[in-house]
Amino acid sequence: MSLNQFTDQQLQEAIASGGSVLVLYRSTFCTPCHTIAGQLEVAIPSLRGEMTVASVNIDLFPQTAAPLELRAVPAMALYKDGEPITVMRTFVACQSFIQILSQRTMQ
């Protein structure tokens, strides 16, 4: 599964549609962002149909991350029914969340 690259408008539409949306906020020149993206692609193939998984490049769409007051990337947010229910603001937090997803998909 590859991460869907969303624009600001696409992300807003996905969030507004309800359901669950997992978003990776990343930057083009951020090596840890590429690491997290690769881990996420491997870890979540079974989530298709259960939630939308997206990636947003904050270099191209800086306004998208503004409501979350993100100070650094990579960061991830899980939205449910239009609201952020959890935000992972560090590389380590993102990796920990991906490990949880990985364990879930192995069961």
Image (cartoon, grey):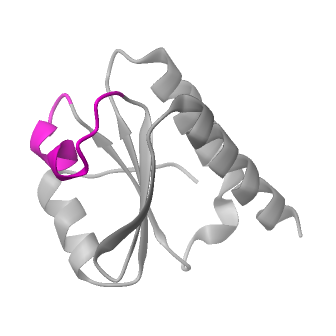
Q: Residue furthest right?
A: 107
Q: Which residues are magenta?
A: 59-72
- Indicate whether residue 94 is drawn in magenta: no
Q: Is residue 48 left or right of residue 23?
A: right
Residue 13, position as x, y percentages in the image? 19, 72
Q: Quadrant of the C terminus?
A: bottom right
Q: Quadrant of residue 22?
A: bottom left
Pick the residue in front: 84 or 15. 84
Q: Residue at x 14, y 37 (%)?
A: 62
Q: What is the number of callouts on the image?
A: 0
Identify whether 28 is placed above or below 26.
Answer: above
Q: As rendered, which of 1 and 71 lies closer to the eye?
A: 71
The answer to if 68 sits in the magenta stretch is yes
Q: Residue 85: x and y, percent?
A: 42, 68
x 74%, y 48%: residue: 99
Above or below residue 11? Residue 66 is: above
Residue 61 vertical placement versus 104 (above, below): above
Q: Is residue 32 left or right of residue 46?
A: left
Q: Position of residue 37 (x, y in %)?
A: 53, 37
Q: The N terminus is located in which quarter?
A: bottom right
The answer to whether 39 appears left or right of 105 in the picture is left
Which residue sits at x=16%, y=44%?
A: 66
As rendered, which of 94 and 17 lies closer to the eye?
94
Residue 90 is situated, as x and y percent measured from the top left of the image, at 49, 33
Q: Residue at x 27, y 72 (%)?
A: 15
Name the quadrant containing residue 46: bottom right
Residue 91 located left or right of residue 30 = right
